[in-house]
Amino acid sequence: MSLQNVITLQLLLTHLYVLIPVCDNDKHYWVGSHEVEKLLEKGKDWLQMHPARELITLRYLKHQRYLVNEALETLLIDEAVDDETEEEIIPEQKVRLHDVRIERVKQELLQSGVKTVVDLGCGEGKLLKLLLAEKQFEQILGMDISYRSLEIAKDKLKIERLPPGKKERIKLVQGSLNYRDKRIEGFEGAALVEVIEHLDEPRLASLERVVFEFAKPQFVVVTTPNAEYNIKFANYKEGKMRHSDHRFEWTRKQFEEWGNRIAGKHKYSVTLHAIGETDDEVGALSQMALFTLLKEG
Ligand code: SAH
């Protein structure tokens, strides 16, 4: 077989690094989750567009289904989610609403008194930046499935250049909210800002267990759009969601029912709140649920 292309040596090497073990399919050695990270790092400029990306991923990760799914999920989600177009149908509101939202989430976390926080689905790290500026938060972890978003977050937070006292307080990890993960356990507070609506039903069900049953922080903030408000947008079309990757958008009642169910099942109390501009009839642009773990006994 012969292949021809004109590319930089660096790009060629990232191909070879991945494709040599893929073509030499007999070697068997232990692969763990760090191999997923290596694959995504080496393949970041080309694997997503590669026509044989499934086969390459399968072979590189020695057919370990769990790892293969994790890697493919990341590749495919990166394809679907473009964070810059979040809330694409309300461009004039975009910046303001998101700023209002993360400021509010920060305030709630401060008031709750938590000292350690995990931002689940942290995206490009806008909330992390606000949290890092508050001394109350001694340990901050940002977790996201998207490698690309984490790279942007790392850049925006200037993690490498932070003074030592700050640098030790923050960490970013790649991971999926669909699997139990020890790294997100043991935090007092957690935030899920505009994340749940990106997951389809079976995945949302696993997220619920991962967060409320296993990680079980004392205080959890969840935000999601309020679907009722969509009718107010100039370019409103029935059924059209605010972002092409949203799997659902809930009314206030649906969010409340979800919150009550989760709280009842996992022993939390829950309160619901409006965020952003509010209309008498359809409610606010965005909505937030605050979960507080009930004390034993
Ligand atoms: N919280 C951020 C980003 C919201 S966009 C903000 O408010 O700016 C939704 C984020 O959830 C994306 O960064 C996406 O990569 C992440 N995400 C989607 N599914 C995920 C999963 N299963 N596990 C972890 N993160 C996920």
Image (spheres, rainbow, N blue to C red):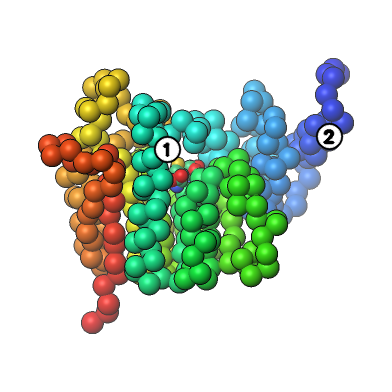
Q: Using the image as rendered, state which of residue 138 and residue 64 is in the foreground.
A: 138
Q: Using the image as rendered, state which of residue 197 and residue 230 is in the foreground.
A: 230
Asked if residue 134 lies left or right of residue 22, the reply is left
Quarter-of-image position of residue 40: top right
Residue depicted at x 63% and y 30%: 48
User: Mark 2: which amino acid?
Assistant: Gln
Asked if residue 53 lies left or right of residue 238, the reply is right
Residue depicted at x 50% and y 33%: 84
Is residue 38 among the parts visible in the rendering?
yes
CB of mark 1 near ligand 1 (< 8 Å): no
CB of mark 2 near ligand 1 (< 8 Å): no
x, y percentage for residue 112? 34, 69
Screen quadrant of the N terminus: top right
Q: Earlier in the sequence, mark 2 or mark 1?
A: 2
x, y percentage for residue 177? 46, 51
Q: What element does badge 2 sit on?
A: helix
Up/down of 71 relative to 236, above or below: below
Q: How far apart are the two marked residues, 2 and 1, measured between alpha carbons?
A: 37 Å
Asked if residue 280 lies left or right of residue 163, the reply is left
Q: Which residue is mark 1?
A: 95
User: Mark 1: which amino acid?
Assistant: Val
Screen quadrant of the C terminus: bottom left
Residue depicted at x 58% and y 36%: 75
x, y percentage for residue 222? 34, 53
Up/down of 93 relative to 140, above or below: above
Quarter-of-image position of residue 283: top left
Up/down of 178 relative to 97, above or below: below
Q: Which residue is mark 2?
A: 10
Q: Residue furthest bottom?
A: 297
Query: Mark 2 or mark 1: which is in front?
Result: 1
Q: What element does badge 1 sit on?
A: helix
Q: Residue furthest left?
A: 281
